[in-house]
Amino acid sequence: MLDVVTKDEAVETVRRFSGTAPGTETVGIGDALHRVLSRDILSSEDVPPFDRSTVDGFAVRAADTFGAGDAIPSQLEVAGEILMGEKAGFTLKSGQCAKISTGGMLPGGADAAVPVEHTDCGDGLCLVYKAASPNENVTKKGDDIAAGEIALKKGTVLTPAGVGVLAALGVYEVPVFRKPVIAVISTGDEIADGAPEDGQIRDINTYLLSAAIRERGCEVYAYGAVRDDKDGIEKALVSCLERSDAVIISGGSSAGARDMTVDIIGGLGTAYFHGIAMKPGKPTIFGTVGNKPVFGLPGHPLAAYFVFRLIVTEYIRKILCLPADRPVKTGVLKENIPSNHGREEYICVKLSGNNEIEPVHTKSGIISVLGEADGFIKIARDTEGLPGGAAAKIYKL
Amino acid sequence: MLDVVTKDEAVETVRRFSGTAPGTETVGIGDALHRVLSRDILSSEDVPPFDRSTVDGFAVRAADTFGAGDAIPSQLEVAGEILMGEKAGFTLKSGQCAKISTGGMLPGGADAAVPVEHTDCGDGLCLVYKAASPNENVTKKGDDIAAGEIALKKGTVLTPAGVGVLAALGVYEVPVFRKPVIAVISTGDEIADGAPEDGQIRDINTYLLSAAIRERGCEVYAYGAVRDDKDGIEKALVSCLERSDAVIISGGSSAGARDMTVDIIGGLGTAYFHGIAMKPGKPTIFGTVGNKPVFGLPGHPLAAYFVFRLIVTEYIRKILCLPADRPVKTGVLKENIPSNHGREEYICVKLSGNNEIEPVHTKSGIISVLGEADGFIKIARDTEGLPGGAAAKIYKL
């Protein structure tokens, strides 16, 4: 008989036996969005690669403009014009300036730019009505990303901003982790094959978990639904292990069915725990077969989703080197939330107005509650709930 | 000469001239994640489709257990066992109960379930040590989703929970909007074609904006970079209009280049505004050609991204019937944030600890600042900044 573990022990066990990343590959920058970097990206060049003007106006030597004002402008000689995309063919000497556009490359000698609206120009001379301090209206070479620095860390999920950084550095072939393939088996004698008859229900978990797996940047192998039958589930598991990096078996709502799943995992490999002191999600099973993790999730879709979110994603985080889960905001509870001593509890909540947290009340919501919630809060194992007015951290669902 | 408009006027104009949705299509439920529903999904059945037990134990008539306790159990006759996925072949009479598993279908006559741990069973008799109230430990038919109700609204972006709702209802072919195709043209004489030489920079916006477009559920037609040349940009625009639903032209950092973009749009169709009183993002252009929106975005990547986020996404929201932009959290400013009177200003911020908001300080960050920020705050047009300690709403980048 396997132990029931705490949620922290469950996470620790899953991370310890999760194995390693599923290998790496190279994708074009156009396909890199939401992929995970498999190594640090070192900047091989300065961004920007030269000092640039941030205004349309004149490149100057700041010292030449000291003391300039509306009454007494500095008078500078126009040495020439900087064309976009080109290097100036001259260097500014003391008393000189050069016409420049936003983004233009400062000529040698220049260390600031003056916007055209503070100048008056004609006949090769330019009056500057406002003093510029050194580096004013200039982006210095390397200000954004300096050569040699780590621009993006291994384990970064590439957002549009991350893709922009890759483009800024000219990294058009991007080293990423191969997407882990996670298989899903839905079990239960009550799962209908087609339109449900009396006593049967539709298979929700295959679709819910497949979408959750894809949302986390993994690929899915959806085996489909099987009956609560030892040979059938074992055959499904063996087939999934051949095609995937990890397997989720959801269902087995009765105690007997869950014991059968533990036996099957234990027969093919090792089962580590059966039961987590958390709610929802208590009847969770974890084991490995040939170093591939196998998760037994509750059949109840809401509970299955929470276990996916809290336990299976720790496997994904581990092998893809992703950062730790963190709350997205802090709010204040609008009402008392009771909880059972002895297990970590998760409550789907909505944010109403100014960071006020309200639980999503539901008689027995199976799937609709997930759609209504803005996130969830945790109630620690050794408390009996949280009082209204208390601060609570909200996690993304 | 076109007017500079306020940000609200800009949004209103973009929404007014955005045209309609790019048509609809049907996708399999396995491909529906993150797609947008093109019509309401009406529930054609109750979920769950029958009253279900939420415990392993016995289905009972609640009235038969009234007054039951540890000292005086109710004594019930076991009428039979409910098999998972099947309808009971009998109806409970007064004084009877039936063995049932979690998820099993309640037999006729039963209106509650008693967990096995509160019972003692043998010889066709069952002692119940705890009274059950009507509906206790039961999920009623239709509790989760009732037949005839709108389960998911048109314009819903399908999350895993939404996909779960579709599965619960047996909607395996999903009506969604076709993904709009948005073209991107990057302009500027300074954009390098290959490794940048002196005065040249790499094309960031093609990749940054393409990723942002994909992240918003649209498809991209990336034209690439063109020089600041009227014929070249016009040719690019015409080519893009043939292949897309909307076009973004980014670049033209100098005033002259921007005027050229306005002229090109005005020559082929209608330009509505040139300049928005916002920062970053002032030099923004909007027009239509043959009812297709054309956006002129600043060349500066951070500014281009903000205009995409605040203006172009309003076009996407409009045609896909998506809900309005809303802040994700409220925080408290850690320090004073100055702003220029007369334009709406956007500041990239980080959340440090307990909802404290700190601006992302950057000398002139072009692209790296986007990666560091947790979101942005708005400073209204007619203020001169926000004081430390003030509450501010944070929007997602």
Image: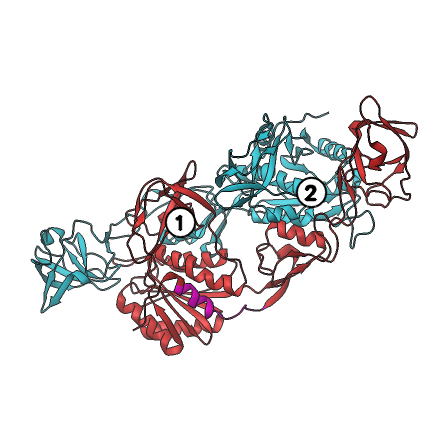
Chain colours: A red, B cyan
Using the image, determine if residue B220 lies above or below residue A24.
above
- For marks 2 and 1, give the CA distance: 38 Å
Going by the picture, which residue comes out furthest to the right? A123
Q: Quadrant of residue B279?
A: top right
Q: In the image, B75: left or right of A214?
A: left
| Residue A397 image offset from top left, x and y in percent | 43, 51
- Residue bearing mark 2: B363
Does dot 1 land on a helix, a strand or a loop?
A: strand
Where residue A135 sits in the image (x, y, percent)? 77, 40
Residue corresponding to mark 1: A376
The magenta stretch is A9-23
Secondary element type, mark 2:
loop
Q: Position of residue B265 (x, y in %)?
A: 71, 34
Q: Residues within 10 Å of mark 2 (few under 14, many from 20)?
A: few
- Mark 2 or 1: in front is 2
Contact, mark 2 vs mark 1 (Cβ under 8 Å): no
| x and y, in percent, of residue B258 in the image | 74, 34
